[in-house]
Image (spheres, coloured by chain):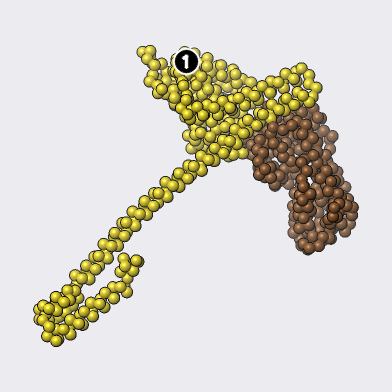
Amino acid sequence: MSNRAKILVIEDEPELAAGIVENLAAEGYLAEVATDGQAGLNAARSGNHELLILDVMLPYKDGFAVCRELREEGNEVPVLFLTAKSDPEDRIRGLEDGADDYMSKPFHLEELLLRVAAILRRNRWYKRSTLDRPVIHFGENEMDFRTYRGRSADGIEHELTHKEALIFRLLAEREGQVVSRDEILDVVWGYEAFPSSRTIDNFILRLRRRFEETSSTSRYFHTVHGVGYLFKGDANDQ
Amino acid sequence: MMDQWLFSGEVQERLQETHRRSLDAAKVMLEQGVTTNNVAEMFPALSVSEDGETIRIEPIIIETLAAERDSRRNRYAWEGGFFLIVLSAAIGVLWRTVQTEVRLRQRQRNFVTAVTHELKSPLASVRLSAETLQYRENDRETRERLIERLLNSLDRMDATVLNVLDTTQIDEGKLALEAQIVLLAPCIYEIVNSLEAAAESAGVKVKIDADDELTVYADQLALTVVLRNLIVNGIDAAAGAENATVTIEANKVDSKTVVEVSDNGRGFHPTEGEKLFEKFYRPGNEIRREGRGTGLGLYIARSLIVESGGELSAHSDGPGRGALFRATWPRILQDGHPPEVKT
């Protein structure tokens, strides 16, 4: 991986796109622009980018659709939505469609740069960490962190969201050790407005639903009250 | 009710039964020596032969009953039918009203979203340029570029606000147009010159074919607003097309001057032509934008042209097949009389 992260800016406002690209370049990133949704989707498919900065209201194909289609094709490139639409529903919709972060226009330059850096850092960590142990087995379960796909003991296939995979990865990387909430927030959410601890609980709950054999007992994903979480696999790694 | 007007078999039988009882009673009375005339008077529904030998139910009674039934059935059918027609018409009118309302609301929502986008995107650009100036050590050239970008974005915001204000004025009937004889070609060249940078950055060629002598009878400012609107739309629609070109052609046709602005770009569905001039209408949906704009530009353009006694129409063979906008203004007539213009 080159040290200069390649970033694709999909934005139909030419002045704004130019301003973002210049600032990204000044930070040492390689930035490209696409000015409509379809061109952006094509560029993202072939581009090997480390991040998309994606507007929502775009010609030909809206940003939500671009993000959704990429995810459906198995492209997990991180997406930062940058949009004039700032309703909470839009934010939720963006995050549901597989976005990593969401900023409304107008935004602060420093905040944009910090968020970009946080997303890149997070994903570089994930990739590095995944190279080491891409697939883990625990009990009858299997999880492939490269494809975000897991299989539970009952044979059901699960496709994890980006955040679920990040949390799982962090816990798996530190298997047998307690990972504090703060650390999860720092690694998985980075600079973004911190979610409540309940949000982390929900993610852990989702992982349990996917992989625990019974809903009442936690064999793999443990809560250490007041401290954080702990993953206990059976250590049959590949 | 159904039984009554359908005269079910059961009811018919009951009627006949009633008369049959009268029949039996009449027979008994005749046997007991009551005169034929008296019996006939007592039972008007029966027909008694002169000699008293034959007594039967008066056929006319059955027929009358049947006729009454038929007429009632008819009446119900007519009244019911009429009622149903009125009811469906009322439902139809209501449905259309609701639909129109829903469409208007949807468009107004789209409009708010569009205006928000049209203001927030350049606003974001203004802030970004200003913060870049503040945040980084920029050389002179970069500073100038940033300032120009900032001013361009402010111009865009200004244009959006003006569009909204123009629309309000049109709606309130406050347009005060002063028609005069205007030379068309210089007006077109001036607009195209001012859009040169935009056309170039969009990779669009602009061709002009207009006779220097051509005049129109219109309000100078309104004419500029309309032409600018059509040309900007053309550049926007052509951007990205192969060999992207906008052609502006002006001609005399009878007492009119016709300006056609065509492009080889995005186009639209042929049935969409009229909708483009409706207030707040924007092709595409709320977030999938088929180009910039608030959905007001063409509404304003047509209102201004109509006020000047002209016409504006749009044609396209379909998405991706370019579009042609035809604007028509009255021209000063040869005898020197200005054309009749609605004021």
Q: Is residue B173 visible?
A: yes
* Amino acid type, callout 1: Val
Name the residue beneath numbered marker 1: B182
Camera-side residue of A61 and A87: A87
| Chain A drawn colour | brown
Relative to A211, does residue A42 appear above or below in the rendering? above
Q: Relative to residue A32, is residue B203 drawn left or right?
A: left
Relative to B188, does residue B40 appear above or below in the rendering? below
Q: Relative to residue B289, is residue A133 drawn left or right?
A: right
Quadrant of residue A214 within the rendered picture: bottom right
Query: Which residue is at a point 71% across and 44% down the rendered structure image?
Result: A95
- Picture coordinates of residue B32 (x, y %)? 14, 86
- Picture coordinates of residue A199 (x, y %)? 76, 49
Q: Is residue B303 visible?
A: no
Query: Which residue is at a point 49% across and 32% down the rendered structure image?
Result: B277
- Picture coordinates of residue B242 (x, y %)? 61, 29
Q: The yellow chain is which one?
A: B
